Amino acid sequence: MFDSVPMAPPDAILGLTEAYKADPNPKKINLGVGVFQDESGRTPVLQSVKEAERRLIEEESSKSYMPIDGSPAYAGAVQRMLFGVDSAVVAERRAATSDTPGGTGALRVAGDYLHANHPGAALWLSDPTWANHRGVFTAAGLTIKTYPYLDAGANALNFDAMLAALREVPAGDVVLLHGCCHNPTGVDPSTGQWEQVAALLARRGVLPLVDFAYQGFSVGIEEDAAGLRAVAAVCPELLICSSFSKNFGLYRERVGALTVVGSTADATAAVQSQVKTVIRRNYSNPPAHGAAVVATILEDPALTARWRDELAAMRDRINGMRRAFRQWFDDRGVRLNPRGNAFITDQKGMFTMSGLTKDHVARLRDEFSIYIVGSGRINVAGITPGNLDYLCESIAAVI
């Protein structure tokens, strides 16, 4: 049977890493996969995480299975991050959270839930969106549609076109929104724009699904939740897929969460029962370690403060490289966009849509060993003081 199986193409993003590793050029740079790197190009383990793990090793007393939806302590910590400590959603028991294997696991569980319980619902994705969204939700059996998002000419949000498209989304469909640090563009709505989107979705009877993978990587934990909270304030029902790969540096531990918000506690409990059925048929119950690390940090004020400081340092490093990246081109009169380079520092989070074409990207890979996604998306966290000049000189050469 296996002899007739064709070779699958490499993943568009993770495949770049394999090519990068095989490249012998000592100047090679990987700006593809979305992983934070420090100034030396390493992805460090946070000190707050090390301390939490030390405590867990000393105190852990069992390796028995977790509940299907994970630990209540983790669920509570996730909900406080999402909605705040005084949230009515939490107080009214309108939220239920499941521990999932990463943010991708949360997305797949959400997709399977929607396919099983709302079979007529189409899922609307922004254009562009994270490359794996379409694959995950198509595999779950959902019908995929898109709404405009990026004005490529200006490298800015095409808000009017976005609103116009969302006005046509039928009631009962699902719209995926990026909670902050939109991947791949780095372009986020303002708070006022978030409020307009939330009000429109509520009027249309559309279910928001918020992909929240970068909380804390834009401005701060509370500030980055403003869009989500604007949606939760007016939309009686929503789904939220969280990831703690980036803000806790727990990439390989696969720590995520799916949070259901219903109009009543009873409605939430019914949906959560269906989510647990989906989980049971997939991976049965979640791994414990990563979620326990997150809960340990967020339940201890001193550890939380240390973690927030480390998160701020990661955010500051990314923003510092954004400024340096833009400044290099400004100082030399080189424009990555006809309207200038301000978009680089206007965008938020790990990524920037550079404006580089597929031909530019191919030349950067073939001639300079610089690995960038074909769309021109650059992981700013992969830029360091040591590779900045070589990177910018190479980009200037191909454009």
Image: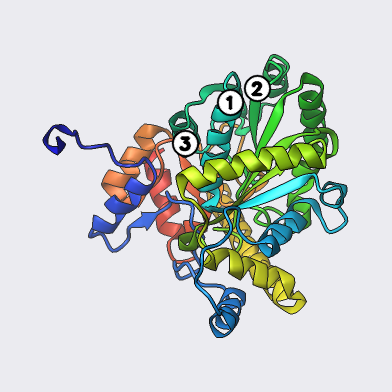
> Residue 363 placed where, x, y %?
31, 40
Circles 1 and 2 in contact, beta carbons < 8 Å: yes
Q: CA distance from mark 1 to mark 3?
A: 12 Å
Query: Looking at this rendering, what residue extends furthest in the left direction?
Result: 3
Name which residue type carries label 1.
Leu
> Residue 104 placed where, x, y %?
51, 46
Q: Which residue is mark 1?
A: 123
Residue that appears at 35% across and 33% down: 359
| Badge 1 density bin: few <14, some 14–19, many ≥20, Cα 10 Å | many
Q: Which residue is mark 3?
A: 136
Question: Residue 173 got which mark?
Answer: 2
Q: How many marks?
A: 3
Secondary structure beneath dot 3 equals helix
Residue that appears at 69% across and 14% down: 168
Please state which of residues 372 and 126 is positioned toward the viewer in this rendering: 126
N-term-proximal mark, 3 vs 2: 3
> Residue 95 placed where, x, y %?
76, 46
Q: Is residue 3 left or right of residue 269?
A: left
Quick one: quadrant of the N terminus? top left
Q: CA distance from mark 3 to mark 2?
A: 17 Å
Q: Is residue 331 visible?
A: no
Residue that appears at 76% across and 42% down: 227
Name which residue type carries label 2.
Asp
Question: For residue 20, what is the image quadrant?
Answer: bottom left
Q: Is residue 40 placed above or below 15 in the rendered structure?
A: below
Q: Is residue 303 left or right of residue 139?
A: right
Q: Is residue 235 placed above or below 82 in the rendered structure?
A: above
Secondary structure beneath dot 1 equals strand
